Amino acid sequence: MSKTNTNQPSPKNILSWFNPIGKQTGGLAFILNRVTAIGLTLYLYVHLIVLGQLANGPEAYDGFVSLMNHPIIIFGELLIVAAGIMHGLNGVRIILTTFGIGVTHQKLQFYILMGIALIVILIFAVRMFNA
Amino acid sequence: MPETNSNTENFPPSENSGVWLVKIITGPFLIILLLIHFIVNHFIGQNGLLSYTDVINYYKNPIIPIMEILFLVTVIFHSSFGIRGIILDLRPTREMMKIIDIFLIVTSVTAIVYGTWLVITIASIR
Amino acid sequence: MSDIKWNITLKIYRQKENEPSHYQDFFIEVDPDEYVLDAIERVWAFQDRTLVFRHACHHSTCGACGMRVDGVEKLTCITSIRSVTKDGATLKVEPLRNFPVVSDLAVNMGSLYARMETVKARSILPITEAEIETPKSEWNNTDDQYIRLSDCIECGLCISACPSAATSPTYLGPAVLAGAQANGNPIDPSLVKLLDSEDGLWRCHSAFECTAVCPSNVDPGRRIMNLRTQVISDNFHKLFHKTQGKTDE
């Protein structure tokens, strides 16, 4: 039987993970979890390095913090908060469904958990931008 | 015949329920620890971010350095195993996976050692 | 069938051996209550006899006509044109993902069938295993009075939709894991190492796209989760008995 080499599973299809076309609720949750996972991991290591400023004394650290008071940076920090909360609650969905809790209602579970996430993120957004 | 056999026939599995359990056990701990971390850093701080003095005062409470080190170890485990899972989705060869594992172990250990040193340094400042 | 006629464009994926793939447009008049497969068959019959696609039973039993319709996996014999497009619109039809293309819309499903054999998936199941009840601790062939055909028609839609199957050539895939789960408890010892591995249960990341596209009520996502619970529970028991053995020495 003739066959072509196209269309086969391959690491080259990596971008298909992030393509929302054709994906339903759970597939979008997958994209969200993966994007937040990678984003948070990158931020984690940058954050650890940046915190080294603390060891350089008050002038160095407070100087750095004053730079961070820019609205764009605060927005970036809010994105990190959002990513952390969404990834965490999506993880809760993964744990619950794995143990059979609500597995037939996994879409509803996702909506509820992301609803909670949105509320928490909004609370943080208000606090962070009003400070 | 298309490839159907798994690498596990001749080698131990590169991922199993134990690896997954590390991720889902560290996960809920992180939800709590991260929430505390976010609240302290973005809610309680006067200007939405803690100053140097705020941080030093915060670390004077002995529970805080212990919590932060536990937080660091938990998050490094969770993220390293998580990233490893993402890489395994790309099905690297066994040799490639060994190199990736070494890289992940080195970065994780470095991060934990560095982070612990930093926490102890800050907590020691009076 | 009504008297209403729609004029639609089928944008069909074409791929012949040693040629680059491309999309070809076919304009066709359809009854919106016909099925996508009917339209494809008419394109073949009256417009292009080189179009290759797979079809058989026409009533969602054989699993042959699985394709991607506007990016979503469907059994085209039960997908009405009205449900996926409108008059004057273009409908994109592509082969399933994650299987090598044989020609145009027909893919080589060999890997799926071979893996179903590897996990000894059965087509006839006792009612409890077919319906994902809590697996009994031991299943005996004579235990259950009632048996039925397994829901899985091996159409491959779940494997096409699965994001993990897109990048991992050796991942067993939702249909195969669901087939292994339906064999009941305890898990065949020869399969545990395969299931509890990077090519088995742990490649699943709970996207549940498999469940979303399954036309046959298999609910592969739920079966994978159930199998995970079994494997974790079995591993705990093994660990406990090993520890017990050590303290008894």
Image (cartoon, coloured by chain):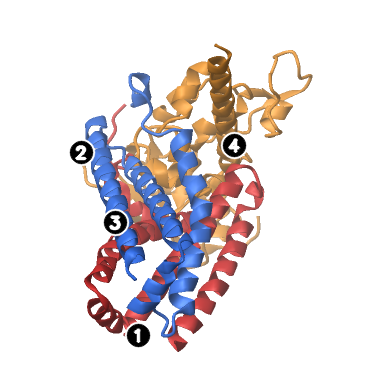
Which mark is on residue C223?
4
Badge 1 and badge 4 both on one subunit: no
Q: Amino acid at mark 1?
A: Pro
Q: Position of residue C101 (x, y in %)?
A: 33, 38
Badge 2 and badge 4 both on one subunit: yes
Which mark is on residue B117?
3
Query: What chain letter is assigned to the residue under label 3?
Result: B
Q: Position of residue A78 (x, y in %)?
A: 42, 75
Q: Quadrant of the N terminus of chain C?
A: bottom right
Q: Residues within 10 Å of mark 3 (few under 14, many from 20)?
A: few
Q: Amino acid at mark 2?
A: Asn
Cβ–Cβ under 8 Å for marks 1 and 2? no
Q: Secondary structure at mark 3?
A: helix
Query: What chain letter is assigned to the residue under label 4?
Result: C
Badge 3 and badge 2 both on one subunit: no
Query: What chain letter is assigned to the residue under label 2?
Result: C
Rendered hue of chain C is: orange
Cβ–Cβ under 8 Å for marks 1 and 4? no
Residue receiving disc 1: A71
Which residue is more in the foreground, B17 or A5? B17
- Between tags 1 and 2, which lies in front? 1
Query: Horizontal placement of C3 versus A91: left or right?
Result: right
Cβ–Cβ under 8 Å for marks 3 and 2? no
Q: Residue placed at 43% from the left, 39% from the top?
A: C203
Q: Amino acid at mark 4?
A: Arg
